[in-house]
Image (cartoon, helix red, strand yellow):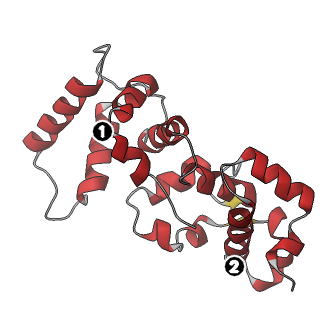
Amino acid sequence: MGGAGSLLHREALREYQELTFLSKQEILLAYKRFSELLPKEQRDNACSRRVPKSRILTLPELRANPFQHRICRVFSTSEEGDDSMSFEDFLDMLSVFSDSATPDIKSHYAFRIFDFDEDGTLSRKDLEKLVNCLTGQGEEVSLSNAEMEQLIQNILEESDIDKDGTINLSEFQHVVSRSPDFVSSFKIVL
């Protein structure tokens, strides 16, 4: 088998560079990593394959991420609902998490990841799931009901500009824009 460059056509490589925040070298490395998630007999044709979610979750960058399942869900274009990923899905994910992605792109996808019920707003239930993911849901560090309620109330007071009891994308992006650390912490390194 040749190098990753020989398996990605020049035209496709150029198109991926135009459509993502990734460099040529990062795309080639992404192709190599994606191919390695496939069985050996499928690696020569990786661009036309889908990698099961279970294999995507073996990546060290996702293994310890409390949002690993939501990340796969948001970036998967699988019509089967199995959250498997194509190479283009994989590139989209890496592109959004790259240092070169814009703060607006990062916050848009973060919002989608945190929107557990996928209704376009962060409701109290979404915020509770978000907090549980961040604090180690079900472990000794989980919050009491009163602590959870107070935390969610504080989040809504700070973020819910129109006072409708939920956080929409523009409200979320407004809060994130005031948090420069958010962009630097929202990444996956190749």
Placement of 97 over or under 103, stated as above or below: below
Secondary structure of the residue carrying numbered label 2: helix
Residue at 57% over, 46% down: 101
Residue at 44% over, 23% down: 170
Q: CA distance from mark 1 to mark 2?
A: 36 Å
Q: Residues within 10 Å of mark 1 (few under 14, many from 20)?
A: many
Please indicate whether residue 139 sits to the left or right of residue 172 in the image: left
The dot on residue 181 is none
Marks 1 and 2, the one that precedes in the sequence: 2
For residue 128, what is the image quadrant? top left
Residue at 73% over, 74% down: 35
Front-most of residues 2 and 124: 2
Residue at 53% over, 74% down: 58
Q: Which residue is mark 2?
A: 36
Task: State which quarter of the image contains the N terminus.
Answer: bottom right
For residue 157, what is the image quadrant? top left
Secondary structure of the residue carrying numbered label 1: helix
Front-most of residues 124 and 64: 64
For residue 51, what is the image quadrant? bottom right
Placement of 150 over or under 17, stated as above or below: above
Q: Pointer 1 and pointer 2: residues touching (CB < 8 Å)?
A: no
Given the image, on which type of amino acid does mark 1 rest? Answer: Leu
Foreground tag (1 vs 2): 2
